[in-house]
Image (cartoon, coloured by chain):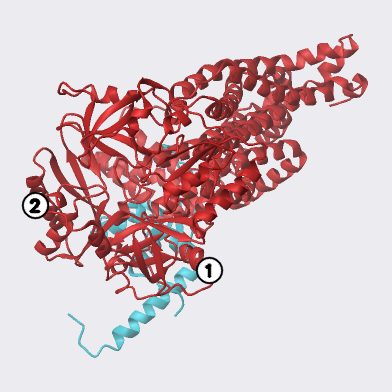
Amino acid sequence: MKGYLGEFEELVLLTIANLGKEAYGLGLIRDINERTSRNLSMGAMHSTLTRLEEKGFITSFLGEPTNERGGRRKRYFELTSTGINALHDMKSLRDELWANTKVKLSL
Amino acid sequence: MKNQQHPVPPRWARKSLEWWAGTADTEDLLGDLEEDFLYNLAEKGKLKAQLIYLRQVASLAFSYSLKKRKKNSAYSHYYSGNSLTMIRNYFKIAVRNFSKQKLFTSINIVGLALGMSVCLLALSISVSILQSDSFHDKKDRIYQVNTHMIDKDDNVVYGSTFPAVGNYMEEKYPFIETALHIHTGFLATVNHNNNLLDFHGYFVDPEFFDVFSFELTQGDPSSALATPNTIVLTESVAAKLFREADPMGQLLETETGTYTVTGIMPDPKQTHLYFEVLTSELTYIQQRGQTNRVTEWQEYRGHYLYLLLQPGTSPEALELALGQTSQKAGEYNAERSIALESVGLGEAVPRWNISNAIGIGWDYPSMLFFLFIGLIILLPAIFNYTNLSISRALKRAKEIGIRKVVGAEKGQIQMQFIVETIVITLLALAGSILIFIPLQNEFLTIVAAAEVLDTSLRPLLLIIFILFGLLIGVVAGLFPAIYFSRLSPIHSLKGGYQGGGLRSVSISGIRKGLFVFQFGLSLFFVIGVATMAKQYRHVFSRSHGFSSEQVLTIPFYGQNKEVAIEALAAHPDVSSVTAASHLPGIAIYNQAEVTPNGRDTIIVAEVFVGSNFIENMEMELVWGSSLALENSTINEESVVVNEQFLRSVSVFPRSADTLTFVHADGTHARIAGVLKDLHYEPLSTEIRPMVFRHSLQNSNFVMLGIHSNDVPKTIGELEAIWAGIDQKIPFEATFLDSEIERAYLFLTVQIKIFSFLGALAITISCLGLLGMVSYATENRTKEIAIRKIMGASVSDIYLILTRDFVKLICYSALLAIPISYFFYDRLFLYMLIRYGTGVGLGEVVLSVVFLFLIGFLFIFWQTSKVAQTNPATNLRYE
């Protein structure tokens, strides 16, 4: 299995996939905060995004200027094929582990 | 569009984030921040929204994300910081500039190297002092006991303490592992090959080598000083006394007894103790005899105590114990209040204020003073650099203009100049270290006991030197850097700068001040040297109040003095004979106490003299007769005193007979004559009350008045007479004149130091002058050529070129003369030679003329180049 994916990193990648065309910094924070009832700081989120970009799991591009945000552009993120592969690897590992459990896991 | 109606996030937070991010792209981050703020504003209210905003800004500021973005942007063209590549480029430009401007570069390197050399010496000494005693294994557990004594006159901390304290504390407090006593004042005078050699040292407890980590190269450290009359020699002493032979177990005959050599140790280095030999504490007890309990608790001078504590003892316990011991000491010292204090071994030197310190007693004031002197010499060199750099502005304005147009920012221009300066200072540092090595050797010979300091070039010292060089580089480069970074590219490129250039080339404002300071300082030192030389001459020309010409002195070594005197007097060339315990003109180190009224005592210098001393030395009596000196009765001894003695005793109430007093040994004395105050001691010491007693037995020197046409022959004959009395005793005749000259060795040392500093200051200022003149004239080449074509004569040209500089030199003289007069006349000479002549007009004039000559020489040399050349060639210049 190539490249270790952290729990939070996996979460961010999946959220990017979920948000689709609307995946930008603050949007991601809000979404994750809602779903997991965390209180993420911007620093933490952007650091993770930067690292993911470094690893080649996502790419980013600047959007069009809008009237909100003082006319500033948003930076949108999308998954690369490496990122999708990493998610698949992670999922298959999980599935394998779930499938082979010796203890009853169903609730 | 206007959306100023609703609240906005705190502006300063956004601004500071932007500042922190530098050129990194933060558009999306700021956008996220603002969007979040507006959202929170609607949801949670203004205050909460602002707080969240601040928290988010902080989290971003320290985030990896921002760090990464900054790093990325560092390699973009918009980054204004300094990367390694840029510094490499600055370095390259600096080297190219140096090779283009050889005169400028060499002047600065030489100037800075000279200037830094004294600083390096001061630094190396300071480092060495601060590192004192860091080599002892148990240094953290060793404490020196100090005595803080307050009585009605004084409030003084002494480095020494009462001898009784050590034993008292060692018995009473179990946490004290060892109480180590050290008594100073051990003097071993050894007769070695007919030369009397003095070795100074300490009486120490046997545990000395256990407490301190001094090592013995030979001998057993635990038993070396366990018995009386044992002695440990340092290697240099052993080499002096025994050369190749094995010194161990040898017997050492001294004036205070015979000692067995039980150990050899390397010369002590990097420690606050200073000794050549060590003997045992038991020797001390044997020599002094049993002292009583009371004086053990009262006498404190020269007794030192070091406590080695058990591991893990808290400093508070020691404080408490010292407090209790202070109370005990107070019982014996009712009239003064005593507080014992402890000082860790590491802090024993340097100290701010301590009396009677053991060893050399390095202190902060003298250390800082020395550093200050170093800086005073360095400052002119730094000024030179600043001065010359700025006067090069014309040459480099274009370069800077182009840099700016291409996109260099202020910071980059500044960095470029600072890098350039640092390169110069580091080159100068290398030169300075070359000067430092001989300078340090010279210093070690001048300053007493300096050999204890380890000033050799260690890695630590080298690192400090390099840091120092970098610091100087930044300091020297800062001003030119700021100056150049402010140049407007438009002006410098259009040549507009050149238009106004004349103003900047002619020396102005701050640079004038620097120049005046440099020459003032040089003049200050030159006047110092001249004054000192005058004192030196004065010392020998001034009448000390006695005749020292043609007086031959020979030290006695235990032969029959009367026989010797009689035999010598028989020689036809000897016109007079007498004897004395101390030679006139030379400092008297021992002192005696006398009691004028049975109660009060005064301290006097006591001199024992032979017959006819006062007549032979041509000393002037104001009252009484010198012959009376020999008319002592059984009850009363006749003595001669000086006027100072009478003044000193006059403050005490006395009985009717004011001419009597009592010596410390109980002898009653009657004053039979009063000498006019004379300088029996060197002129640097104040005239003390003196008592002359008649005693041939206590005299140490025979003094012969010689009238001879062939002095060497006479001396040879006298030596034969001397040898005839006792073969074994050496004949060491010297003339009193040369003995006195030796007593003023300190003056020679001062002259040496001032000459050296003066030479440095003058060289540096002249280098500066040379640079300034050469650039000023170079920049006016065209002007001069036109003037010549228009009909100006060579002398006119000289006048035009030199006027500015001559004016400045005059200002510096006006400034320096009153300051040096005040400093030398009122302060320095007063401390150095109390009975000197002060600063004379002649010296000042001479110094000024000297400096002017040197200055003019440099100006003339440079201006000749321009003034004498063919104007046609000069017009083609540029």
Q: Residue B544: x and y, percent?
A: 47, 27
Task: Quadrant for residue B490, please give it.
Answer: top right
Q: Residue at x 71, y 36 (%)?
A: B104
Instruction: Provide the secondary structure element on which disc 1 rests.
Output: loop
For the residue pair B53 and B315, the one nearer the viewer reads as B315
Which dot marks residue B243? 1
> Which shade is chain A?
cyan
Residue B713 seen in the current view: yes
Vertical side of B325 occupied by B241: above or below: below
Q: Residue A4: x and y, percent?
A: 41, 74
For the residue pair B488 and B189, the one nearer the viewer reads as B189
Q: Which residue is mark 2?
A: B324
**Separation of marks 2 and 1 at Cα, in angstroms:** 51 Å
Q: Residue B825: x and y, percent?
A: 48, 21
Q: Nearer the viewer, mark 2 or mark 1?
A: 1
Q: Amino acid at mark 2?
A: Gln
Quick one: label 2 or label 1, which is nearer the N terminus? 1
Circle 2 marks a residue in which chain?
Answer: B
Instruction: Provide the secondary structure element on which disc 2 rests.
Output: helix
For the residue carrying disc 1, how many other residues have a C-alpha within 10 Å: few (<14), some (14-19), or many (20+)?
few
Q: Amino acid at mark 1?
A: Arg
Q: Residue B721: x and y, percent?
A: 55, 50
Chain coloured red in this rendering: B
Is the Cβ of the residue at disc 2 closer than 8 Å to that at disc 1? no
Can you say which quadrant of the picture contains the N terminus of chain B?
A: top left
